[in-house]
Image: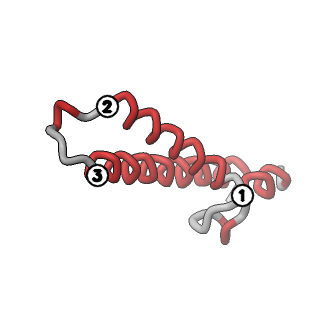
Amino acid sequence: MSYQDDIVTWAFAAGIRAIKTAAQTAASLIGTGAVGFTDLDWVQIASVSGVAAVLSLLTSVAGIPEVSDGESAFTIAGRQ
């Protein structure tokens, strides 16, 4: 694979992980309260889920198993 292909693959895989992390975080926050659907604090849920997604992306910089045997983004960029 070329450098650009590896970066695109990494970004796609990291994005999917971030979306899954945000969804799991939102699901856990929604499921913890014994309140009605309209009583949920959607801004807080979106905020916490967004932070979780950013943390997932930052963690993915260190490497993710879906890309080139877990290479980090810095290793991939160094091959250019």
Disc 3 and disc 1 in contact, CB within 8 angstroms: no
Nearest to N terminus: mark 2 or mark 1? 2
The secondary structure type at the circle numbered 2 is helix
Nearest to N terminus: mark 3 or mark 1? 3
For the point 35% across and 45% down, the residue is 26
Q: CA distance from mark 3 to mark 1?
A: 31 Å
Is disc 2 surrounded by few (<14), some (14 to 19) or many (20+) residues within 10 Å?
some
Q: Is residue 23 left or right of residue 31?
A: right
Q: Is residue 15 left or right of residue 1?
A: left
Which amino acid, by three-letter code, is at mark 3?
Thr
The quarter of the rendered structure image containing the N terminus is: bottom right
The secondary structure type at the circle numbered 1 is loop
In this rendered view, identify the residue nearer to me: 60 or 43: 43
For the point 62% across and 62% down, the residue is 64
Residue 8 lies, in percent from the top left, at 61, 47
Occupied quadrant, residue 36: top left
Is disc 1 surrounded by few (<14), some (14 to 19) or many (20+) residues within 10 Å?
few
What residue would you read off at disc 1? Answer: 62
For the point 57% across and 42% down, the residue is 54
Q: Which mark is residue 32?
A: 3
Q: Establish if 80 lies above or below 71.
A: above
Residue 73 lies, in percent from the top left, at 73, 53
For the point 37% across and 28% down, the residue is 43
The secondary structure type at the circle numbered 3 is loop
Q: CA distance from mark 3 to mark 2?
A: 14 Å
Residue 41 lies, in percent from the top left, at 31, 31
Which amino acid, by three-letter code, is at mark 2?
Trp
View extreme (front): residue: 34
What residue would you read off at disc 2? Answer: 42
In this rendered view, identify the residue nearer to me: 29 or 5: 29
In this rendered view, identify the residue nearer to me: 76 or 38: 38
View extreme (top): residue: 43
